[in-house]
Amino acid sequence: MSGRKKKYDIITHYLKTNGGSQVTLTFTQFDELLFPATGLPKTARRTTDWWANDYTHPENGAYAWLNAGYEVVVINLEKEYVVFNKLIKSNWLFQ
């Protein structure tokens, strides 16, 4: 496997290093902390679909937070923030 960074790996790293059981990030924080060169994608600002907890659309950000062990639980496009909750691993998944 190559060492190529995926577009949204910075979100994975941020959540893994800074996350508690719940993390709230504003779109401005995404722009300033995580994507200072490009800003948050325009589609992320316009549609809740971009924030879906869905591995089948890698062009969106889901891989980033799911790989960090989080899921999106609140998206507020009007007030421009998103809330992530840490995924709880259930024992029954591993039996």
Image: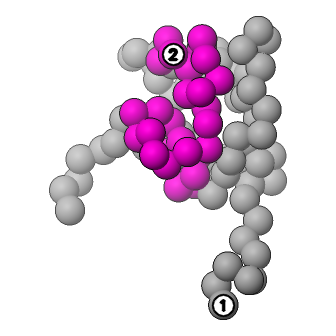
Vertical order, 83 against 48 (above or below): below
The residue type indicated by label 1 comes to Gln
**Residue 50 image point, x, y percent:** 55, 27
Report the residue at 47% width, 33% height from top.
60
Residue 1: where, in percent of width, then height?
A: 20, 62
Q: Sort mark 1 into few (<14), some (14-19) or many (20+) by Cα contacts within 10 Å.
A: few
Q: Secondary structure at mark 2?
A: helix
Q: Where does label 2 land, which residue?
A: 43
Residue type highlighted by circle 2:
Thr
Q: Nearer the viewer, residue 66 or 21?
A: 66
Tell me which segment is drawn in magenta: 41-68
Snapshot quadrant of residue 77: top right
- How many numbered discs, if any? 2
For disc 1, the marked residue is: 95
Q: Position of residue 64 (x, y in %)?
A: 51, 45
Instruction: Give the image quarter of residue 91.
Output: bottom right
